[in-house]
Image (tube, rainbow, N blue to C red):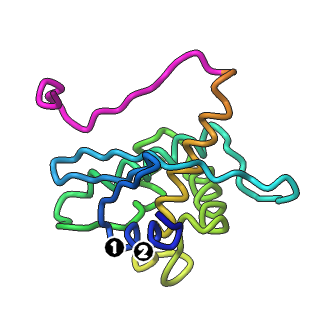
Amino acid sequence: MSPGAIDLLADRGISWADADGQADIAMPEGLYIARLKPRPLPRNKTTLLTWSPSADVIAEYILSRRVQSPAGQVDFWNGVDRVAQIAHATGISAGQVAKVLVTFDEAGYTAKFGPERGPSSTRELRGKSSLLSDWAGHYKRGTGRRQKAELHVLSRDPTGLE
């Protein structure tokens, strides 16, 4: 599939799979499968995004919320939790969470709406496919340093995933 077609389907929250084995599939039961080609970083590109341990955890948290939306939200939720909520859930300081979210904004993964601060200030996940792809690519490039794998199951009953 072309990158434009993939972006179009992703923006509408429609699952897809192509002949190259790439896929982005979300099931209502909370199962989320993504297999995308990591976007190569140009050698001369400078970016403010550094895949620090806190950026890793925050990206994983944001991506996991795509399939586990907050209570009371129905259908499609494309928001990003508030800084305090992410800090509480991840154990990362609110200041560091805010810094990482600003770099995610600059990279095009998220976008901030409304006033700078306050209850009406919100963030939206804009580039979920690129965030997932870049995050996965970061982990793939770092496999030489890591000797472990972390798996997450969004169910309290793993026997139901057979």
- Horizontal relation, residue 15 to residue 103: left or right: left
Q: Position of residue 57 (x, y in %)?
A: 52, 41
Read off the magenta span.
Answer: 146-162
Q: Which residue appears at 25% of the width and 38% of the height?
A: 154
Per the image, label 2 sits on a secondary structure element best described as helix
- The residue lying toward the viewer, choosing from 97 and 56, is 56
Disc 2 packing (10 Å; few <14; some 14–19; many ≥20):
few
Q: Which residue appears at 83% of the width and 59% of the height?
A: 46
Q: Position of residue 98 (x, y in %)?
A: 59, 58
Q: Position of residue 137 (x, y in %)?
A: 61, 42
Q: Which residue appears at 40% of the width and 55% of the height?
A: 18
Q: Is residue 20 above or below residue 149?
A: below
Callout 1 touching callout 2 (CB < 8 Å): yes
What label does residue 12 carry, if any? 1
Q: Amino acid at mark 1?
A: Arg
Q: Which residue appears at 63% of the width and 40% of the height?
A: 138
Q: Residue furthest front?
A: 19
Which residue in the structure is indicated by mark 2?
8
State yes or no: residue 127 in magenta: no
State yes or no: residue 149 in magenta: yes
- Horizontal relation, residue 13 to residue 157: left or right: right
- The residue lying toward the viewer, choosing from 57 and 95, is 57
